[in-house]
Image (cartoon, rainbow, N blue to C red):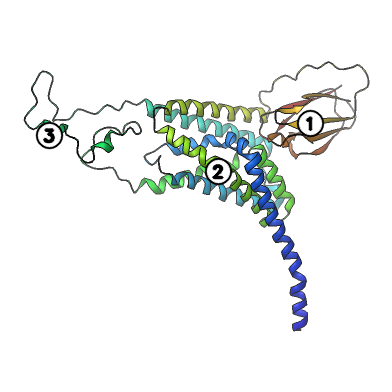
Amino acid sequence: MDRGGRQERVSGQPGARTLSAQVLTLLAGGAAAGLLAGTATCTAAQGGLLIGLADGPRGRDPALVGWFLAGRLASHTAAGALLGLLGSAVTLPPQARAVLLVAAGLTVIALAVRLIRRDRTPCANPPSDAEPAAGTEPAAGAELQEEPTAGAELQEEPTACGECGPATAEPRPTAEPRPASGRRAALLGAVTVLVPCGVTLGMEMVAITSGSPLAGAAVMAGFVAGTAPAFALLGYVLRRVSRTRLARLAGVVAIAAGLWTAGTGVNLGGWLTAPAPAQATSQGSRPTSVTVWATREGYRPAMVDARANAPVEVVFKVLDQGCTGTVVIEGRDVALPATVRLPPRPPGTLRYVCGMGMYAGFINFS
């Protein structure tokens, strides 16, 4: 019995070691993908939400960025575990992601407008009872009020609008905003999982194919860890700038980022599509197999010809890693490289787009 039990335990070790090796490999691969490929695309798609950390009395607290990153790590890790356990059943369809991208863009715009309006609010000190009226001599003892006290230098430091006036008799509480601000920052970080960039979609595909909740959580956690330095730096810069006279400029940049995010959602949903580019083609027989290359600048060629009323194979090859590594075609996500087999289609144009809605391509059936 004991010998057999030892044999059973020994026979079970290779499987555990294989799973551990898979988890470590996916963790390292996710971190590398986040650091090398996801830094630019994810900060572009999700970084605008960091403008929400600059609002409120605790906007300078460096812990807020930590709360943001913690919420982002928790939500992505949980999503990876669910993808590894349930597969593609828990992934969002492209149309739902398009709606969320538009909502995220509008949220960033609202936060940016709030920041600009707060910066434009005049910080004039309200007149006090001790100030002399126009044309009168200052009362005795008035000079004592002009001398700076121990805490006066802190009041002269430029802060958010409405905070540069003289101190009141009742000091503002500083302990209560901390939990609320931390929860808000963590919530902003958590909702980034609903606005995935193109590389995030690729990592989600890896989590699905892993077939294990632990492996799926590992690849997503590694990916978030790889993108964390870029988000931390961006959050630091936004918080510092928002407390200076450049806050208005930061708000304008954030509005542009929000418009860009909302525009990618509209493009992903195909609600305002641009016309297909014109391309001169020969009058001969159209092919039943076409090749498209995914590059950093989009899909090349942007327009290909294929035979109508016949099955067509679209061979997607990857030249550069980026958001074009995931393509949305016929309402489904496809991780590249891949070969997509299309059923017979009537004459017309089929549009496909990258997972972030940034780059589009066309297939002309004729």
Q: Say few, some or many: other residues with alpha carbon within 10 Å of mark 1 (under 14 / 14 to 19 / 20 or more).
A: some
Cα separation, mark 2 vs mark 1, equals 31 Å
Describe residue 173's horizontal placement relative to residue 275 as left or right.
left
Q: Could one spot residue 82 in this view of the protein?
A: no
Q: Is residue 45 visible?
A: yes
* SS category of the residue bearing label 1: strand
Cα distance in 3D space between marks 3 and 2: 50 Å
311 vs 224: above or below: above
- Residue at image x 61%, y 45%? 226
Q: Earlier in the sequence, mark 2 or mark 1?
A: 2
**Residue under the image location 44 percent in, 47 percent down:** 63
Image location (x, y in percent) of residue 213:
67, 56
Picture quadrant of residue 2: bottom right
Tell me: residue 151, above or below residue 308: below
Residue found 60% across the figure and 41% down from its top: 194
Say which residue label 1 marks. 293
Secondary element at tag 2: helix
Q: Quadrant of residue 361?
A: top right
Residue type pointed to by label 1: Trp
Percent coordinates x, y for residue 93 in the rendering: 68, 39
- Among the two numbered marks 3 and 2 on one chain, the one whose residue lies closer to the N terminus: 3
The quadrant the C terminus occupies is top right
Asked whether, in this view, residue 155 is left or right of residue 97, the answer is left
Q: Which mark is residue 144?
A: 3
Q: Which residue is mark 2?
A: 229
Instruction: Give the amino acid at mark 2.
Output: Pro
User: Does 124 sit above or below residue 199?
Assistant: above
